[in-house]
Image: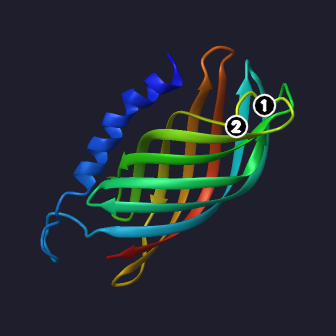
Amino acid sequence: MTQHRRCLLLSPALALAWAVAAAPLPAQGSATGPRTTLALGLGLSNSAMSVGGTSGDATGLLALVRFQQRKFALELEFHPYTVPSPVIDEGFRAFYALAGLRLPLESHVYLLPALGLQFRFWTGSQRVTGSDYGPALGVVLGASLRLDANTTLSPELAYRTALIELKGSVSTRVLAARVLIVRHL
């Protein structure tokens, strides 16, 4: 399946998730759900690129923004460091756009499975293209620690995986520890 077709298949799911997340909220103080939130975060991650079972990895900082309304979340995450290919002189920096559903596990603990796209920006003397994208999925395990009436601190562990190319079994995976400051709007 070409990358363009994969994008077309994922686009309706992302659009639907965004439409639900952007739906009008109940009045403040309503018992039907939390208010809209905006979260900014930083983290430390280890990313690996696997080609036919051989992998190369890199560790670096990441930055993210999450918009959330009720249980629906849209997350944008940027990895500014280069993940090397284990077989040729190329590597990539990545940007993730994921939509997901926040599921409570305990009173302050949550799980956030998400689906979306990974955009890659390639470097190196043997790179095939300047940029491309592919389907991505991930899951986050986090906790909410209330700082005041409108602010929460959320430490999280995140896992992401993305398909680069079906032929040759080329994929990526990311493990990350992140901290977000969540502002309830």
Q: Secondary structure at mark 1?
A: loop
The residue lying toward the viewer, choosing from 61 and 117, is 117
Question: Looking at the rendering, which quadrant does residue 134 occupy?
Answer: top right
Q: Is residue 145 above or below residue 61?
A: below
Q: Who's the residue at 72% across and 28% down the image?
A: 50
Q: Calculate the distance from the C-alpha at mark 1 to the C-alpha at mark 2.
A: 7 Å
Find residue 31 and report its horizontal and vertical position in percent. 14, 68
For image coordinates 29% across by 68% down, the residue present is 36
Query: Where is residue 61 drawn, in percent x and y?
Result: 70, 59
Residue nearest the observer in this picture, 145 or 98:
98
Q: Residues within 10 Å of mark 1 (few under 14, many from 20)?
A: some
Query: Relative to 176, is 115 on the left or the right?
Result: left
User: Would residue 100 be found to the left or right of residue 33 on screen?
Assistant: right
Q: The residue under label 1 is which amino acid type?
A: Arg
Residue 130 image label: 2
Q: Is residue 111 left or right of residue 70?
A: right
Please say which color scheme the image uses: rainbow
Task: Please state which amino acid type lies under the numbered disc 2.
Answer: Gly
Residue nearest the viewer, comparing 104 with 102: 102
Looking at the image, which residue is at 20% across and 64% down? 33
Pointer 1 with pointer 2, Cβ within 8 A: yes
Q: Which residue is mark 1?
A: 127
Numbered mark located on residue 79 in the image: none
Q: Quadrant of the C terminus?
A: bottom left
Examine the rendered structure and indicate whether residue 86 appears above or below residue 59: above
Asked if residue 14 can be seen in this view, the reply is yes
